[in-house]
Image (cartoon, grey):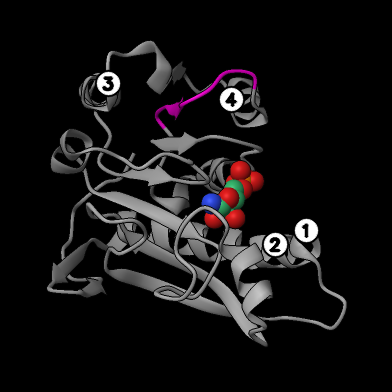
Amino acid sequence: MVLVSGSGTNLQALLDAASDDAYGATVVAVGADRDDIEGLARAERAGVPTFVERVGDHLDRDKWDERLAERIAGHRPDLVVSAGFMKILGPRVLAAFPVVNTHPALLPAFPGAHAVRDALAYGVRVTGCTVHLVDAGVDTGPVIAQEAVPVLEGDDEKSLHERIKTVERGLLVEMVGRMAREGWTTTGRTVRLGTTSGRTTK
Ligand code: GRF
């Protein structure tokens, strides 16, 4: 299942890929932390069940985490993909499911919510995207795959982010598909694909 907070173009790439049986994974549900976002509309158009859990509707983040874990569990996913989900996941969700995140920078450079802006402000010539497993930190989990994107003269945050997102969608689709088809194992900070068989990912 996929968690979103915004436009959901990464989600769309996963939905498109999953429409082919050979991909090996289906999107069983889409969850969000806010209403009225294109990501939810994309799920609805694809006929995928959706739910919304707003932090503000709960007493505190701990209660939100508890409820979010229940909502996710209701769909029995094998893998949770955080694709532009702009909240830090809590301990209950992380204990119950493997979670993959996509981040628009080459971690450990530029973690956090403003990765593209921060990379431009720093003046790097190369940035990119990272697909990684989520742990309790902010963008600190073991790296699954990374791809570089050059910063071009005249780039602003929007143009650079759009170029990164084009690469990011391809990398996320490829990695989620491989995890579903081939399985994976994590040893320390090393994620190896193709090491477990027979897992199916929803
Ligand atoms: C992606 O670049 C993601 O890494 C970042 O926000 C963007 C989400 O884009 N956190 P979308 O909602 O999938 O279009």
- Residue at figure coordinates x 32%, y 54% from the top left: 180
Q: Which numbered disc flags the more N-terminal residue, 3 or 1?
A: 3
> Relative to residue 177, is residue 190 depicted above or below?
below
4 or 3: mark nearer the eye: 3
Q: Which numbered disc flags the more N-terminal residue, 1 or 4?
A: 4
Residue type, numbered disc 1: Lys
Residue type, numbered disc 2: His
1 or 4: mark nearer the eye: 1
Q: Position of residue 154 (x, y in %)?
A: 87, 77
Q: Which residues are magenta?
A: 28-36
Question: Which residue occupies the foreground of this view, 34 or 124?
Answer: 124
Residue 29 part of the magenta segment? yes
Q: Hey, which residue is sitting farthest right in the picture?
A: 154
Number of marks drawn: 4
Between the C-alphas of marks 3 and 2, the distance is: 32 Å
SS type, badge 3: loop
Between the C-alphas of marks 3 and 1, the distance is: 33 Å
Q: Name the residue tied to disc 4.
A: 40
Between the C-alphas of marks 2 and 1, the distance is: 5 Å
Q: Name the residue tied to disc 1.
A: 158
SS type, badge 4: helix
Crowding near pointer 4: few (<14 within 10 Å), some, many (20+)? many
Residue type, numbered disc 4: Leu
Between the C-alphas of marks 4 and 3, the distance is: 24 Å
Residue 159 part of the magenta segment? no
The response on whether ligand 1 sits within 8 Å of label 1 is no
- Residue at figure coordinates x 38%, y 36% from the top left: 1
